[in-house]
Image (cartoon, rainbow, N blue to C red):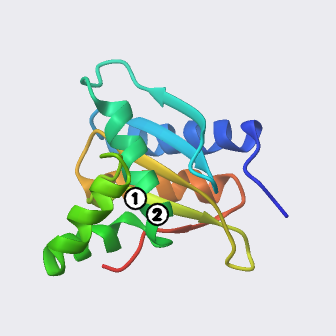
Amino acid sequence: MAQITLSKANTIIKAALAKGTELGLRPLSVAVLDAGGHLKAFQKQDGASMLRFEIAFGKAFGALAIGAGSRTVEKFAKERPHFVEGLVAASGGHVIAVAGGVLVKNAKGEILGAVGITGDTSDNDEVAAIAGIEAAGFVGDGGQS
């Protein structure tokens, strides 16, 4: 089974940050997790505010927790807040229910991990995450819009 190697994780981060620079986004922070929710790599651009690791990690962790991009977690938070409350509690507070957590999939659609980005709007964070994932040769899935 394919996995996100450290080299691929660093490619994701480099490309995501480059996309942020290209779009003129505020300083980004990027967390790459493997399929088990373990941190593979993290970087925070100069000027990024505090708690960015926790937010980026939480976006990616939430996507993995439900098997869909964090845009879906955000949708659930609006439609089924009791479910997301339970999800956040069960995760020890690790789930952040906003867009910007994108599943990393292979060509067969198998989940290999997730990327969480924070720093700009959630929509822009998601765009940067998908750019990074695709640059590493994977497929990004941000969830339902």
Question: Where in the figure is residue 14, as x and y percent of width and height?
Answer: 58, 36
Q: How far apart are marks 1 and 2 (CA)?
A: 5 Å
Amino acid at dot 2: Ala
Amino acid at dot 1: Gly
> Which corner quadrant holds the C terminus?
bottom left
User: Relative to 57, does residue 101 appear above or below in the rendering?
Assistant: below
| Residue ID at (46%, 45%) | 19
| Residue ID at (46%, 63%) | 65
Residue occupying the far top of the picture: 46
Q: How crowded is mark 1: few (under 14 residues within 10 Å), some or many (20 or more)?
A: many
Query: Residue 62 has which mark?
Result: 1
Along the horizontal axis of the image, is 92 left or right of 140? left
Whether residue 27 is visible:
no
User: Which residue corresponds to mark 2?
Assistant: 65
| Residue ID at (18%, 79%) | 80
Q: How many labels does the image show?
A: 2
Please, what secondary structure does the residue beneath circle 1 have?
A: helix
Question: Where in the figure is residue 61, as x and y percent of width and height?
Answer: 45, 53
Query: Residue 106 has which mark?
Result: none
Please, what secondary structure does the residue beneath circle 2 have?
A: helix
Label 2 near label 1: C-beta < 8 Å? yes
Q: Residues within 10 Å of mark 2 (few under 14, many from 20)?
A: many
